[in-house]
Image (cartoon, rainbow, N blue to C red):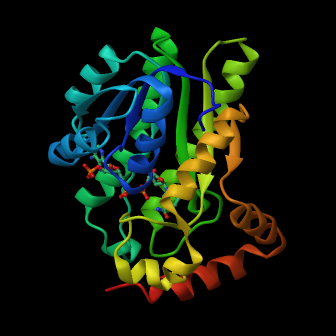
Amino acid sequence: MEKAKKIKKVVLLGASGGIGRQLAERLAQRADQLLLVGRDESRLRQAVKELGESPAQLDYRVLDMRDRAALEQFAHNLEADLLINCSGLASLEQAANLTAAAEADIWQVNCLAPIFLMKQAVQSGSCTTFVQLSSLAAICPHPYLAAYSASKAALHSYCLSLQEELRQAGSAMKICVYTLGPTQTGILPQQAAAALGGGGLQLQASAAAAGILKQLEKERTSAVIGARYRLLVCLMKLLPQSWQLGLLGHYLRKGLS
Ligand SMILES: NC(=O)c1ccc[n+]([C@@H]2O[C@H](COP(=O)([O-])OP(=O)(O)OC[C@H]3O[C@@H](n4cnc5c(N)ncnc54)[C@H](OP(=O)(O)O)[C@@H]3O)[C@@H](O)[C@H]2O)c1
């Protein structure tokens, strides 16, 4: 990590979360400026305090991505060499039982807000590299996580299309989409994490953060993080989709409260 290239200005969305907080730790060692963004001010303030000794100049910004006016303001002021979006919302629930409000929040945070920010960044040229975190749930539909799975799939597909448009236009801006499998964070309630094999089988957030930065260093625009999840993606391609759905549904159902 010490030998990694210095980055001037990094903006980290979802910096208070499991993977975001781990990325903050690493980026604070190699960025000149690091802006931590999240919803919960006390967690952001705490993170800035804990990272206070690091070389980067640190600051934080409170942003609720459901607040359209705040999002517009944030996009208007955005300026970054690297933006990594680690924000995300999931709800383990039978699809038909998810309230309209919870459904709207999931689509806004996981899909519409990131798309809005990417479009603004493309139009204004305010960000050089924009990284979105995707999920195995984007590649393979997850019963009982239907809104999460579908919103991540929509974001994933949008990123790949925009990435190609920018490449064909010879744009200096790069969109990266990195896919993660189950990782030990608080995004799902404990019983859901246990249904997916528990902590032992999941990637640690620190390993996910290291994997993301490794792919960035290799200048990959699309990657699956972690050897075991790369293998899993290959195996999934061999299984009929009905089997994948049945297996995932069987395990995730156990996580319903
Ligand atoms: N963990 C996994 O198993 C896994 C697997 C595949 C992909 N991913 C993806 O990895 C990314 C990071 O997830 P994580 O596991 O680190 O989850 P996490 O610990 O729950 O962190 C999620 C982050 O999103 C922020 N957030 C939620 N709602 C927000 C809102 N309305 N406005 C602004 N920020 C909001 C949270 O901020 P507050 O703390 O302030 O609420 C938190 O910083 C997500 O995109 C997730 O989909 C995770």
Q: Which quadrant does the C terminus fall into? A: bottom left
**Residue 78, how many percent across, how many down?**
36, 18
- Depth check: 52 or 48 in front? 52
Quadrant in the picture for residue 112: top left
- Depth check: 141 or 199 in front? 199
Residue drawn where x is 73% and y is 20% of the image: 167
Residue drawn where x is 29% and y is 51% of the image: 105
Residue drawn where x is 49% and y is 82% of the image: 198
Can residue 44 be seen here? The reply is: yes
- Depth check: 204 or 173 in front? 204
Q: Which quadrant does the N terminus fall into? A: top right
Can residue 157 be seen here? The reply is: no
| Outermost residue, left side | 42
**Residue 176, how many percent across, how many down?**
62, 35
In the visual, does 88 lie left or right of 1?
A: left
**Residue 233, how many percent across, how many down?**
74, 64
Give the tally of numbered discs. 0
Task: From this view, report whether residue 240 is shown above or below residue 31.
Answer: below
Quadrant in the picture for residue 216: top right
**Residue 160, how many percent across, how many down?**
66, 37
Task: From this view, report whether residue 126 is shown above or below residue 101.
Answer: above
Residue drawn where x is 39% and y is 51% of the image: 88
Quadrant in the picture for residue 236: bottom right
Task: From this view, report whether residue 198 is shown above or below residue 81.
Answer: below
In the visual, does 102 lie left or right of 177?
A: left
